[in-house]
């Protein structure tokens, strides 16, 4: 930090009551948004109120330091990145101030998350109309800055259509109130003169027939015939005019029931041409996508492109009738009506995740924003898409268009090569030519996400130099010193500078894991995070989602999957985080990662932070002393094997307070935790004895290898023997490995990857003869099964036995489904509660478990999220509070609400231990429950 920066930091600390952080981690976390761009700020301020905002602006004005206002950082054009001071509104200024149901308005602070507002007004039958796909984390302030829209804009319009009044502070420290006509105050002098002097240009300079014209400043809203609407003109200004402190929004009445007409077409142009004809039916949405975005079209009507047309009504019958009417009226190949909430949620999830899933081409290549969201008049969308596809082909590029067909707005990620000089030159040439194409079709360069760094340079192609010059004059009236978000919208930097890839190493980094989905490149794996921030949600995703439990526990960006990926990106860049793998800032951020693997499945682009954490710990502690917990719990299989013969004595000592306290302190274990009880006899011995007594011969196709994982073998062998009873009742034969085996989980999770590979190699030597059987390998502990499925082949990629073992791994329910598909389990007819293990959710799936529970009459849903114990995580000193917070999110409330007759299910040893220690309730593995019912 320079002396000048020190002075700014000191002055801000003295002036504001909020948080001021000019540290390495704070700066690194704010270098990027969800765009291709990266700019390094000096520091971050989280203001507590409007007075703090004014005070921060005064300090920055005095020192000539730029200011960037930031919400969730989900902007795709680069406008949430910047130099100078970032104002982070998500930490403190995030409240719903008031709701007036009669007036159908709400007053909110700029850092309020859209879903929080929706939850606050839902009981009144109201909603904020605009709903971008990032609704679970985007902020109202960011929506005003970008003039966001969303899927329902065909009915309820853009943010500008739904804003009633704005309060802000100019860079000169002047508080302003913005509304229509005389409902404004504090407006910069000279604004009326600027409008009067340019009436003709303002009346003729904007394209017509564009419901999604987001590009540039909406100066035509200041025309007298449009009511001189300053609030509307401010929307879409991307933080360049003043800093928002409060927003009054209008609310819309929402239909009591909804249905979804899904229409299939032969191609996307046909779908696009059909979309305008559906608008007279007054649908809530007309969304489109093609089969290159949805390669698995199971459950969708026949076709290669689809429209999702949502309808509403006072009753379910009315909503369905309207959807059916649209299916009949549409000139589609095929159509269907979906009106069950779960089915509609599943379909909308495909659409909402598209901003992430589209960042991978069908063959696994990378695709990026940059030409993300242009809009043309809806009637021109079909011809535009044909021309757009042709232009892509001419440049040798690929992309998957999708989006708001009813509004003529298209989203697309394109496989630009942004790592080479030639690729960046192609990126620029394509951007210039597609801008001309959009203008030729009467369109707007931006139809939702704003201009930012990606498109502002191209605005003269759309508006001409005279109107763009007027934009500059408008900006200068508000911000004469140019402090607010410089280089955005007005006097922009070139669109091919400040790319976030410029700072990454060009040669692969030497790493332990194989990263097979990223070409073996760790930088490529880290690049997966495009910043859409699905990990920043305050609640786990519906349907059993997991990601990201530590963020939900702390609310801090550095504890989100995105935050950790950003720090790893900056570690590789070496500009802010300068000590590489030894970085204390990266270690601190990763410390609260539970390695739950939730991001591997829930992140739209498959960021796998558990693997990245293990990789980082491997390098961070290379040749150095590790934390005590790594030696104690990271090498748990070794200690349990050594302690096994002395189990009674060890258990007695563990129950003796002073000895237990001393042991926990020495081993880095949280003092609040009880030490687990060792089994007097391990599963491996019990199973050998059992198999010696068996004389039955089983068909080869009905035989499984039962894996004695460390947790089942040494800590809960009753689970293993219960599984044996059930498998044999289903006429499934059992074979056990001929020697000691271990998946290596505890070594991987603590980053002891050299030792993990040694353990895995020995295990592969042991099981190699069994692999010839071709039998499924039944692993009762989900975390061990997930390790064998993913970590084993990714660490031992050069050993073909690893892939064969990984392909053989099955859960208990999967084995029964494969080997005994016609077997009927005992009918229990009881409700269940508990948790699907996070590793099972992320890697293995739970379809077989659901089917088996249904067969047994075990009804109800298991909780999502993470139990919070997560192997060694919840046992480590310093993690107890976060561990409990994770359990309190879903698991503990569900168990407390369960009746006494409810069966508590938890297949993971960690989940069962967490319930035992926090709720004093005993949960059981599904195998135990079925065995009891035999």
Image: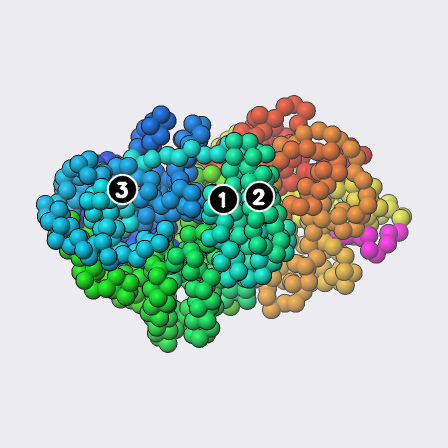
* Pick the front one: 416 or 684: 416
Q: Where does residue 511 sit, x and y in percent of width and height?
A: 48, 65
Mark 1 lies on a secondary structure that is helix
Mark with earlier residue (1, 2): 1
Start and end of the magenta stretch? Answer: 697-705
Q: Residue at left 76%, top 47%?
A: 816
Q: In this figure, which residue is indicated by the disc labeled 2?
A: 325
Q: Residue at left 42%, top 60%?
A: 380
Whether residue 777 sits left or right of residue 891 in the image: it is right
Q: Give yes or no for contact between labels 1 and 2 (Cβ–Cβ under 8 Å).
A: yes
Nearer the camera: disc 3 or disc 1: 1
Tell me the number on the disc at residue 46: 3
Is 699 magenta? The answer is: yes
In the rendered picture of this protein, how many numbered marks are placed on residues? 3
Image quadrant in which the C terminus is located: top right
Is 456 magenta? The answer is: no
Q: Residue at left 42%, top 68%?
A: 416
Q: In this figure, which residue is indicated by the disc labeled 1?
A: 281
Mark 3 lies on a secondary structure that is strand
User: Label 1 to label 2, Cα distance in Å?
Assistant: 9 Å
Q: Residue at left 28%, top 66%?
A: 461
Q: Where does residue 36 sit, x and y in percent of width and height?
A: 36, 61
Nearer the camera: disc 2 or disc 3: 2
* Pick the front one: 398 or 672: 398
Q: Give yes or no for contact between labels 3 and 1 (Cβ–Cβ under 8 Å).
A: no
Q: Quadrant of residue 798?
A: bottom right
Q: Where does residue 375 sit, x and y in percent of width and height?
A: 38, 57
Whether residue 129 sits left or right of residue 45 in the image: it is right
């Amino acid at each position: 930090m320079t002396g000048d920066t020190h002075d700014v930091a000191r002055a801000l600390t003295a002036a504001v009551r909020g948080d001021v952080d000019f540290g390495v981690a704070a700066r690194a976390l704010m270098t990027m948004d969800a765009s291709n761009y990266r700019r390094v700020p000096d520091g971050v301020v989280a203001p507590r109120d409007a007075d703090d905002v004014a005070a921060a602006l005064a300090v920055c004005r005095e020192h000539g330091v730029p200011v960037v206002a930031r919400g969730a950082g989900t902007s795709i054009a680069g406008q949430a990145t910047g130099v100078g001071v970032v104002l982070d509104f998500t930490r403190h200024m995030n409240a719903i101030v008031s709701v007036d149901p009669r007036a159908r308005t709400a007053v909110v602070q700029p850092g309020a998350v859209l879903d929080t507002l929706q939850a606050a007004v839902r009981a009144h039958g109201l909603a904020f109309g605009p709903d971008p796909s990032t609704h679970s984390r985007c902020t109202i302030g960011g929506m005003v800055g970008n003039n966001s829209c969303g899927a329902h804009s065909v009915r309820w319009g853009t943010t500008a259509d739904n804003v009633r009044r704005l309060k802000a502070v100019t860079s000169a420290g002047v508080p302003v109130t913005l509304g229509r006509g005389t409902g404004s105050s504090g407006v910069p002098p000279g604004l009326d003169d600027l409008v009067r002097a340019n009436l003709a240009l303002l009346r003729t300079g904007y394209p017509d027939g564009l419901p999604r014209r987001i590009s540039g400043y909406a100066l035509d809203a200041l025309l007298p015939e449009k009511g001189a609407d300053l609030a509307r003109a401010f929307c879409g200004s991307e933080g360049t005019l003043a800093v928002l402190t409060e927003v009054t929004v209008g609310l819309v009445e929402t239909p009591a029931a909804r249905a979804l007409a899904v229409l299939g077409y032969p191609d996307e142009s046909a779908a696009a041409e059909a979309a305008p004809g559906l608008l007279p039916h007054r649908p809530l949405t007309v969304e489109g996508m093609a089969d290159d975005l949805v390669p698995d079209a199971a459950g969708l009507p026949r076709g290669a492109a689809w429209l999702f047309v949502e309808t509403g009504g006072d009753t379910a019958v009315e909503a369905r009738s309207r959807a059916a009417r649209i299916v009949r009226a549409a000139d589609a190949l095929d159509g269907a009506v979906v009106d069950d909430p779960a089915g509609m949620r599943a379909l909308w999830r495909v659409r909402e995740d598209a901003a992430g899933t589209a960042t991978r081409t069908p063959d696994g290549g990378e695709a990026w924003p940059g030409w993300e969201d242009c809009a043309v008049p809806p009637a021109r969308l079909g011809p535009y898409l044909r021309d757009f596809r042709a232009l892509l082909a001419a440049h040798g590029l690929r992309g998957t268009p999708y989006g708001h067909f009813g509004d003529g707005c298209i989203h697309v990620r394109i496989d630009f090569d942004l790592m080479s000089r030639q690729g960046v030159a192609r990126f620029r040439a394509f951007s210039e030519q597609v801008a001309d194409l959009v203008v030729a079709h009467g369109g707007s360069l931006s139809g939702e996400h704003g201009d930012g760094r990606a498109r502002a340079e191209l605005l003269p192609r759309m508006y001409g130099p005279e109107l763009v010059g007027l934009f500059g004059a408008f900006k200068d009236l508000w911000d004469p010193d140019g402090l607010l978000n410089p280089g955005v919208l007005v006097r922009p930097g070139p669109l091919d500078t400040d790319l976030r890839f410029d700072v990454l190493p060009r040669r692969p980094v030497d790493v332990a894991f194989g990263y097979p989905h990223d070409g073996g490149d760790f930088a490529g794996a880290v690049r997966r995070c495009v910043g859409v921030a699905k990990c920043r949600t305050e609640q786990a995703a519906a349907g059993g989602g997991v990601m990201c439990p530590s963020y939900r526990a702390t609310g801090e960006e550095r504890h989100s999957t995105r935050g950790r990926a950003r720090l790893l990106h900056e570690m590789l860049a070496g500009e802010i985080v300068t000590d590489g793998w030894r970085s204390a800032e990266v270690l601190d951020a990763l410390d609260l990662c539970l390695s739950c693997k939730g991001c591997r499945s829930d992140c739209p682009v498959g960021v796998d932070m558990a693997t990245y954490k293990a990789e980082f710990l491997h390098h961070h502690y290379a040749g150095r002393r590790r934390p005590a917990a790594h030696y104690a719990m990271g090498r748990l299989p070794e200690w349990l094997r050594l302690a096994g013969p002395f189990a009674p004595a060890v258990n007695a000592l563990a129950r003796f307070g002073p000895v237990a306290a001393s042991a926990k302190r020495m081993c880095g274990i949280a003092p609040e935790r009880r030490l687990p009880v060792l089994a007097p006899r391990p599963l491996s011995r019990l199973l050998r004895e059992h198999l010696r007594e068996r004389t039955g011969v089983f068909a080869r196709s009905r035989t499984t290898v039962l894996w004695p994982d460390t947790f089942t073998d040494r800590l809960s062998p009753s689970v293993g023997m219960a599984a044996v009873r059930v498998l044999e009742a289903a006429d499934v034969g059992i074979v056990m490995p001929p020697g000691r085996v271990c998946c290596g989980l505890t070594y991987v999770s603590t980053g002891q990857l050299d030792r993990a590979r040694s353990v895995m190699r020995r295990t592969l030597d042991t099981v190699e003869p069994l692999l010839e059987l071709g039998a499924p390998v039944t692993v009762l502990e989900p975390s061990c099964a997930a390790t064998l499925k993913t970590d084993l082949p990714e660490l031992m990629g050069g050993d073909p036995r690893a892939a064969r073992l990984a392909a053989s791994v099955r859960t208990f329910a999967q084995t029964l489904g494969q080997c005994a598909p016609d077997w009927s389990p005992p009918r229990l007819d009881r409700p269940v509660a508990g948790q699907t293990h996070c590793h099972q959710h992320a890697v293995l799936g739970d379809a077989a478990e659901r089917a088996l529970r249904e067969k047994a009459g075990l009804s109800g849903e298991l909780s999502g999220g993470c139990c919070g114990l997560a192997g060694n995580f919840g046992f480590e000193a310093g993690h107890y509070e976060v561990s409990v917070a994770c359990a309190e999110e879903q698991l503990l409330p569900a168990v407390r609400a369960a009746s006494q007759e409810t069966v508590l299910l938890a297949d993971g040893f960690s989940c069962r231990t967490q319930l035992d220690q926090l709720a004093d309730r005993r949960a059981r593995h599904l195998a135990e429950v079925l065995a009891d019912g035999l």
